[in-house]
Amino acid sequence: MKMLRAVLLTAGVLQSFATEAYADGDVAKGAIAFKKCMACHEGAKPANKLGPHLVALFGRKVAGVEGYKYSEAMKAYAATVPAWDEANFNTYIEKPKAVVIGTKMAFGGIAKPEERLNLIAYLRTLK
């Protein structure tokens, strides 16, 4: 029982460090980075375009926007990653086609870690 408690405590501490790291992004620079997403994704209101809207993304179920037709590949990904958080989105947006093989998303990804961090900071403001 002590070992389980130690593991859970460590996981909680690591999660708080990860969340703090993503909070360090520059929201204004993230808004600029979001321009790469705007052709396919809505950020101002919960309305789908070519891709699902990104309002209130973090904490939302992966492949969970009602009325959006997700690829089978994204539905399969959702079975292994139940909800979007900063860490799994960071991994996904770096190379979407490598993370979700068969995704409909044509975007190649954002290679620069700082740009992804800024985008995440901006996305956190979309409520």
Image (spheres, helix red, strand yellow):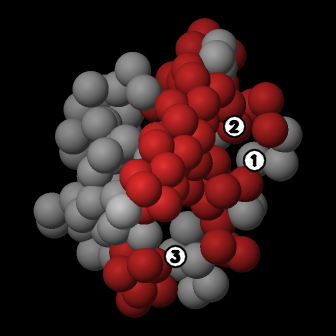
Q: Nearer the viewer, residue 80 or 5?
A: 5
Find disc 2 in the rendering and name its residue. 116
Determine the CA span between mark 3 and mark 2.
20 Å
Q: Are marks 1 and 2 in contact (CB under 8 Å)?
A: yes
Nearer the observer: mark 3 or 2; the answer is 2
Tell me, for residue 50, which label it has, or none: none
Please name the amino acid that badge 3 sits on.
Answer: Lys
Q: Nearer the viewer, mark 3 or mark 1?
A: 1
Is 78 displayed left or right of 28 in the figure? Answer: left
| Residue 102 showing in the rendered view | yes
Q: Element under label 1? A: loop
Q: Are marks 3 and 2 in contact (CB under 8 Å)?
A: no
Q: Amino acid at mark 2?
A: Arg
Quarter of the image with the N terminus is bottom left
The CA span between labels 3 and 1 is 17 Å
The residue to which callout 1 is attached is 110
Q: Quadrant of residue 37?
A: top right
* Residue wearing tag 3: 104
Residue sitting at 69 percent across and 37 percent down? 116
Task: Name the residue located 37 percent from the left edge and 42 percent from the top edge.
Answer: 58
